Image (cartoon, helix red, strand yellow):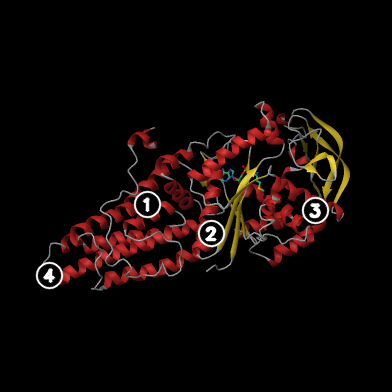
Amino acid sequence: MSKGRFYLTTAIDYANGAPHLGHAYEKILADVIARHQRMRGKDVHFLTGLDEHGQKVQQTAERQKQDPQILCDGVAALFREMLCLLNISNDDYIRTTEPRHKKVVQSLLQKLFDAGLIYRAEYTGFYSVRQEQFLHDKDRKEDGTWPEMFGEVTQITEANYFFRLAKFQPWLLEHLQSNPDFIYPRFRQNQVVEFLKDPINDLCISRPKTRLTWGIELPFDKDYVTYVWFDALVNYYSAVADKDRWPADVHVIGKDILVPPHAVYWPCMLKALGLEPPRRIVVHGWWNIAGAKASKSAGNAIDTLDLARKHGADAFRYFLIREMTVGQDSEFTQAQFETRYRTDLGNDLGNLLNRLLNMTGRYADGIVPEAKLDEAPEQAVRELWATTATKYLALSSDYQLKESLEDLWIFIRSLNAYIEARAPWKLGKSEDPTDKARLQSCLAHIAEGLRLTATALTPVMPTISQKLLADLGVPEATTFEGTLVWSNALKGKKLAEKDILFPPIIEAESSAKT
Ligand code: MSP
């Protein structure tokens, strides 16, 4: 039975280049949230997509002497391939050149125009021909001149259309005050409040076709196209306009696009349209590689996806979620990936399963015995699980995913320590019936501990979890309801003989070699 609806989105990626680590992380983060909510019984709708209009795409297409739509089609294929590679469970993929999107953007523009919330005005400013953008005083160098990258800068006057953004500033401040959890983490919300301390300007929402043709035509003036941010933000609404899903429960975005687009333009646009703001914006930090933001232009990002190809999506997903506190930046190194792969995944989790399969094969014909004897070590394992499960659910519902995995690994390591303490290989040699019962309880506890671990891990590592559960003779976990409590559900189950969940990294491929 559904426990309510949950609509989740990611930023839509620019169509002017190939996917990289930053895009991959955001989709994985959102996917973990989506899978978690599904397992909590929510009817989830998970949207991601591609941002296809604007100057950057037009310029890239011109440089490549290609039709912009063909360029976008090619990039869309690359992004969808990435989603597939990373096992992202999105329910929809929106492209801003699709008619379903254009239609909604135009109708919302017309509505604002009719309500007098969009007006035409002349704007005078400094314009960079090379970058094809208006500049502000903050773009100047300290000596007042313009940086070289802008080329020739001239003062021009241009007529454009403006959205009455400033009118909504008092409402937005009030909304932030009465909804302190609107933006996660909270320090980001404070940045928005800080930004709003100064008066904001109305937003220019048009570009004359003389400068930019690759965009959605304004419904009230065919000489203009829509400014790309106005167009792009609407994707969250246009994709569900006919689905009764609005408002979104969570928008997942990176810190660079919070202020002003998501935290200022978007809520004010919605307010002006009489629509509810999203319930929450979850803002993640940046992945850096060698100190610089991973990006297409830095050319440092593409190979990271190769790790998912070589070592499996789940290992890659685990690594990114385990390393980054949601909201903070993180440094990506292949060496750190390999360390986590070998220790957390290979040694702690993979070996635990193998020990269980081996010993159950040797001492119990591969069948999970009944836990008849209950002594202090067994009780301690179960008690630790009870606190771990509660904390795991609480932390992961609150986007503290790295912390939730840290906790889960304390439990996994404690299972390994429990095996060492119980030493089943010694118990197996004993003729004493109490030792035999101890051995049986030990095997049953490890099996059940692994079942619970795999269930909890399902949103982060869906394929590995399913494999692990299959090794234990049970189907994949689809809900957390009732499945995270200690049970004897595995009694009598026939276990797999052997399974290497995380094959060792071949030295030749390791970063240690280079
Ligand atoms: N098209 C806009 C978003 C429009 S949403 C209505 C855009 N696209 S982007 O391709 O540049 O970035 C897409 C997402 O990836 C953003 O949320 C951005 O923060 C994120 N990342 C891009 N590089 C990143 C890192 N190096 N690290 C983590 N995420 C970063 O912005």
In the picture of the structure, the residue carrying the numbered disc 3 is 165
Whether tag 3 and tag 2 are in contact, CB under 8 A, the answer is no
Q: CA distance from mark 3 to mark 2?
A: 31 Å
Where in the figure is residue 509, as x and y percent of width and height? 37, 35
In the picture of the structure, the residue carrying the numbered disc 2 is 399
Which three-letter amino acid code belongs to the residue tagged 4? Asp
In the picture of the structure, the residue carrying the numbered disc 4 is 432
In the picture of the structure, the residue carrying the numbered disc 1 is 344
Q: Secondary structure at mark 1?
A: helix
Q: CA distance from mark 3 to mark 4?
A: 80 Å
Q: Nearer the viewer, residue 64 or 327?
A: 64
Residue 287 in sight here:
no
Answer with mark 3 or mark 2, whichever residue precedes in sequence. Answer: 3
Q: CA distance from mark 2 to mark 4?
A: 49 Å
Q: Is residue 46 above or below residue 84?
A: below
Closer to us: mark 1 or mark 4?
A: 4
